[in-house]
């Protein structure tokens, strides 16, 4: 490289300067009539952001999702009885249930006892089981795949039958007693995935996290804490030459809208911008 080339590069570097702009936004700032969900809304930045090349999440505050939340409180059930086949949907109360499997199963069983089935923990295997507790079901009962079943350790839907196994896709089928495929999980360690359209910093093989703005690690375990402050600069995957409308989504690691339980979530983001002199 000759001296002219070196001078050209040096001059080019002097034509731009990095400035930072701090933007604060809260879920409470949204237009609730247009955006009823606190996890999916649009805000206009008070100042235009030009040539954004990176961000730093300075502060954030939110309530982590409960173990049982809007995304994991539902069970869809099909049962056959002497009166025919019926379909039932139950929604159990949201909460952590003190991270105790006994408390959670007691709550679920209070809803399904009319169907004469029950969940329990097998004392030998330590896994959750589903079994008949009476003669209401004459043929079979099936629970569709759900997040709640995965908490209990069932990787698919689950069905138990008395005489003839039903043909059900995406269900594990057992005669009389079903045992979960894996251990139950009583702590919700889901993180919050912050997505602002075009403000992308994250590469990941996980499609929910890939091209996200940031990932906020969190847990409902009393032994863990939510990080409150970042000091790391994150370069954008692609420089954005002008941004003013912030299209914001808050997701859990499964790609569902994050259940903030009507609490406020707020973020302070430092935008790093190149500005011509």
Image (spheres, rainbow, N blue to C red):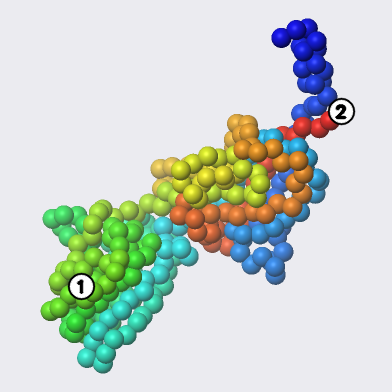
**Left or right for 184, reference 126:** right
Q: Position of residue 222 (x, y in %)?
A: 42, 47
Taking the spot 75% from the left edge, 46% from the top edge, the residue there is 243
Say which of marks 2 and 1 sits in front. Answer: 2
Q: Which residue is mark 2?
A: 277
On the image, the x and y values in percent for residue 104 come to 33, 63
Residue 104 or 188: which is nearer the viewer? 188
Q: Is residue 217 above or below residue 10?
A: below
Q: Mark 1 highlights which residue? A: 160
Q: Quadrant of residue 237?
A: top right
Task: Residue 25 in the image: state x and y as whole percent.
Answer: 70, 50
Q: Residue furthest top?
A: 3
Q: CA distance from mark 2 to mark 1?
A: 72 Å
Answer whether residue 12 is visible to the viewer in this image: yes
Kindly identify the residue that appears in the image at 17 percent across and 60 percent down. Answer: 122
Give the side of residue 84 with respect to residue 196, left or right.
Answer: left
């Amino acid at each position: 490289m000759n001296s002219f080339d070196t001078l050209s590069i040096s001059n080019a570097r002097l034509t731009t300067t990095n400035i930072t702009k701090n933007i604060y936004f809260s879920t409470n700032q949204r237009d609730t009539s247009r955006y009823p969900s606190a996890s999916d809304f649009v805000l206009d930045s008070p100042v235009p952001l030009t040539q954004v090349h990176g961000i730093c999440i300075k502060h954030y505050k939110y309530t982590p999702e409960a173990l049982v939340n809007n995304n994991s409180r539902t069970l869809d059930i099909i049962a056959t009885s002497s009166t025919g086949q019926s379909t039932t949907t139950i929604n159990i109360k949201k909460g952590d249930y003190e991270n105790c499997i006994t408390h959670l199963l007691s709550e679920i069983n209070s809803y399904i006892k009319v169907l004469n089935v029950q969940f329990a923990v097998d004392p030998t295997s330590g896994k959750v089981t589903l079994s008949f507790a009476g003669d209401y079901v004459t043929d079979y009962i099936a629970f569709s795949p759900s997040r709640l079943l995965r908490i209990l350790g069932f990787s698919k839907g689950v069905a138990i039958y008395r005489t003839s196994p039903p043909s059900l896709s995406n269900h594990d089928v057992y005669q009389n007693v079903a045992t979960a495929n894996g251990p139950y999980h009583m702590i919700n360690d889901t993180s919050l995935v912050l997505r602002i359209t075009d403000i992308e910093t994250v590469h990941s093989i996980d499609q929910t996290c890939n091209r996200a703005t940031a990932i906020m690690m969190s847990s409902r375990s009393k032994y863990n804490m939510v990080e409150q402050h970042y000091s790391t600069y994150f370069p954008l995957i692609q420089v954005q030459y002008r941004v003013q409308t912030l299209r914001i989504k808050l997701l859990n690691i499964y790609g569902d809208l994050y259940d903030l339980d009507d609490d406020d979530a707020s973020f302070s983001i430092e935008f790093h911008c190149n500005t011509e002199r």
